[in-house]
Amino acid sequence: MPGARTEPLLGALAAELTPFGLNLIGVAAAREYDALVPEAYRLGSSAPGSAIVFGSGGGAFWRAYRAHLDRHPELATSPDPLDEFTAAIMEQRALPLARRHGLAAELRLPFRSTVPPLSFVHLAEAAGLGCRSILGVLVHPEFGPWMALRGALLVDAELTAPRPAAGFDPCPGCVERPCIGACPGRAIRFPAGWDVPRCIDHRVTNPMECMDRCHARVECIYGRRHRYPDDALAYHQRRAFAAMAAARCRDSLR
């Protein structure tokens, strides 16, 4: 299993992807990931040495995406232009770069189904990129809840990388917890966390109240200066609402 070329690879990946807003790179040992997830999600005997996890913190990724749309306006009519942009970066830049460094690499994306399925939240936790919060999203020590997981490379090497969220546990140490009072649906509680059914009920019943942002997420005390741009907040909230409404429709037909 290759090992000596790992650090040059991570540096090269950072240099290649940071201009596109993919400014978070972590490494999880496959065995550590398997220890965190249910059996159906484990990589098992086919597990590679490591998973390189790619994420974006703050608004840089969204700005890169908007600039890409300005150059290619025809993509705006695609069903999922942001996912297509993400896939293009990972397929055309990250994956070939890993292979040029002599590693066998397999690309995984959070919006593409695989067997076994990959839990990106657990993968990021194993890589020390974030810690789960009562908001239902990962929180990064610098970027707070303004981070997203964009892809992963499963590689046949045992890699190491900094773990910025090691030992970080945001919500118990937060005295203010303004996120709880900010949620109009009262779907955030401590220590219970995000009440998903209550959140869906409120959003479907009052569709405009949370259409342009998650009020609880906006009020999180961590990473406030890295908050997503308003149009990015609205984009993600509308996609989330569509998924919630579809789930509610399916449930009503059972």
Image: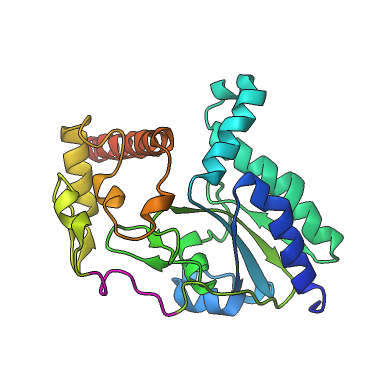
Badge count: 0
Q: Position of residue 94 (x, y in %)?
A: 72, 53
Nearer to the camera, 145 or 244: 145
Spot occupied by residue 168 in the image (x, y as percentages of width and height): 40, 75
**Residue positioned 24% across, 35% down in the render:** 253
Say above or below: 198 vs 28: above
- Residue found at x 39% / y 62%: 139
**Nearer to me, 178 or 252:** 178
Between residues 190 and 143, which one lies in front from this camera angle?
Answer: 143
> Who's the residue at 38% across and 35% down the image?
230
- Quadrant hosting residue 233: top left
181 in relation to 154, above or below: above
Residue 30 shown in magenta? no
Q: Is residue 20 left or right of residue 196?
A: right
Left or right: 254 in relation to 17: left
* Figure colour scheme: rainbow
Residue 173 on the magenta segment: yes
Residue at point 17%, 41% (across, down) = 202
In the picture, measured across the screen, residue 241 lies left or right of residue 167, that is: left
Which quadrant of the figure contains the N terminus? bottom right
- Residue range of the region highlighted in magenta in the rendering: 167-174
Quadrant of the image containing the C terminus: top left
In x, y percent, where is residue 147? 46, 54
Q: Nearer the viewer, residue 217 or 100?
A: 217
* Quadrant housing residue 12: bottom right
What kind of secondary structure does the magenta stretch mostly adopt? loop
The quarter holding residue 231 reads top left
Whole-percent x and y of residue 34? 53, 75
Is residue 97 shown above or below 249? below
